[in-house]
Amino acid sequence: MLGDEANPLRSYLEITYPIREGIIENWDDMEALWAYTFHTKMGLPKDLSKHKILVTEAAMNPKKNRAMMAKMLFEKFGFGHVMFEMQALLTLFAEGETTGLVFDAGDGVSHCIPVFDGFPLYDQVKRLNVAGRHITEYLIKLLLIRGYAFNSSADFETVREIKEQLCYVSYDLNKDRKLAQETTVVDKEYRLPDGNLISVGRERFEAPECIFNPMLIDVESVGIADLIYESITESPVDVQRALVANVTLAGGTTMFPGLSSRVEKDLKECYVKDKFNGDRKGLNRLPIIVHDPPRRKHCVFMGASFIAQNAPDNNWISINQYKEQGEKMFLKV
């Protein structure tokens, strides 16, 4: 069983995921998932030689991963043309922009990509292997401390739903911790699929905290605000002002209430500490704006559909080019 069909029956099934941290690990499962998507869900014919497909991928993904995807799409499915595009670029196009810094956090990987005049600044791209799945795993750990055990692969999906419905990002962590300790304001009840009620308290804001402090889940990296700051300050000086004035959030993990306010606050703190030597008046000279478009969960898809419709033919790689040059043409792109 694949996709949404497996979800209602997940308590009876062993759930597996072919992609981890933006990289395909199980190619057989991925082939089955694509076949299900193309033929069962979309109703495409068996002969796909007249169809084109645009595939998005995370920044700094291994080139070998892209070459394997191309091989499968051309040889197994027989697509006529294939194009690979970076997710951040598509996010900006969906918003009608060509310059800005995109922070994209999906299921397995988060990254910051500065884009200037439609061209990603590859040397300043930052990648963080903490995203939605890691927050869910951390929430399972926090709920275990509270006395609720979620051990099976089916329980993972239940905890993901708890995360999506109840979790939020704290604007002031110390204040929220004090509130959770002294009152029941943050406590919320959640009904499990078996009908039992559980109470979720401080875990609601502690779980998403791991993307601001990855050391909580034993990942040696700075948090997302510092990552955005590093990406901007390492960019050429003449584009930094344009980037910091247009920080755009994208991906499902950025849907947490309060995330954009917290990122903006922490980013301002980074500038005050490192650039303005503690003088907050410096913020008056430098507008720091974090955008959270309401449709940011799907803006990569919207940007991709725009590109797929309007891209000139020379942007696509045809099956004839692939037959002539093979996988090596994807290893150098």
Image (cartoon, grey):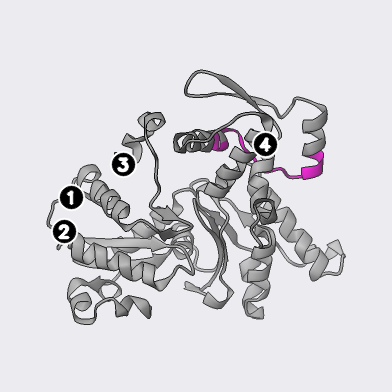
Viewer-side label of 2, 4: 4
Spatial CA distance of label 2 from label 4 is 47 Å
Assess whether mark 1 and mark 2 are in contact (beta carbons under 8 angstroms). Answer: yes
What residue would you read off at disc 3? 2
Which mark, by number, is residue 44?
1
Residue 164 or residue 197, whichever sits in front: 197
Residue 292 or residue 220, whichever sits in front: 220
Mark 1 Cα-neighbour bin, 10 Å: few <14, some 14–19, many ≥20 = few
Q: Residue at x 17, y 63 (%)?
A: 78
Which mark, by number, is residue 203?
4
Q: Residue at x 46, y 65 (%)?
A: 89
Residue 84 or residue 223, whichever sits in front: 223
- Magenta-drawn segment: 163-175
Mark 2 Cα-neighbour bin, 10 Å: few <14, some 14–19, many ≥20 = some
Looking at the rendered structure, the kind of residue marked 1 is: Leu
What residue would you read off at disc 2? 48
Query: Residue 165 colored magenta?
Result: yes
Q: Is residue 72 left or right of residue 124?
A: left
Spatial CA distance of label 2 from label 1 is 8 Å
Residue 71 or residue 188, whichever sits in front: 71
Mark 3 Cα-neighbour bin, 10 Å: few <14, some 14–19, many ≥20 = few
Disc 2 secondary structure class: loop
Spatial CA distance of label 4 from label 3 is 31 Å
Spatial CA distance of label 3 from label 1 is 17 Å
Disc 3 secondary structure class: loop
Looking at the rendered structure, the kind of residue marked 3 is: Leu
Q: Is residue 206 left or right of residue 51?
A: right
Q: Quadrant of the C terminus?
A: bottom left
Horizontal and vertical percent for residue 305?
34, 57
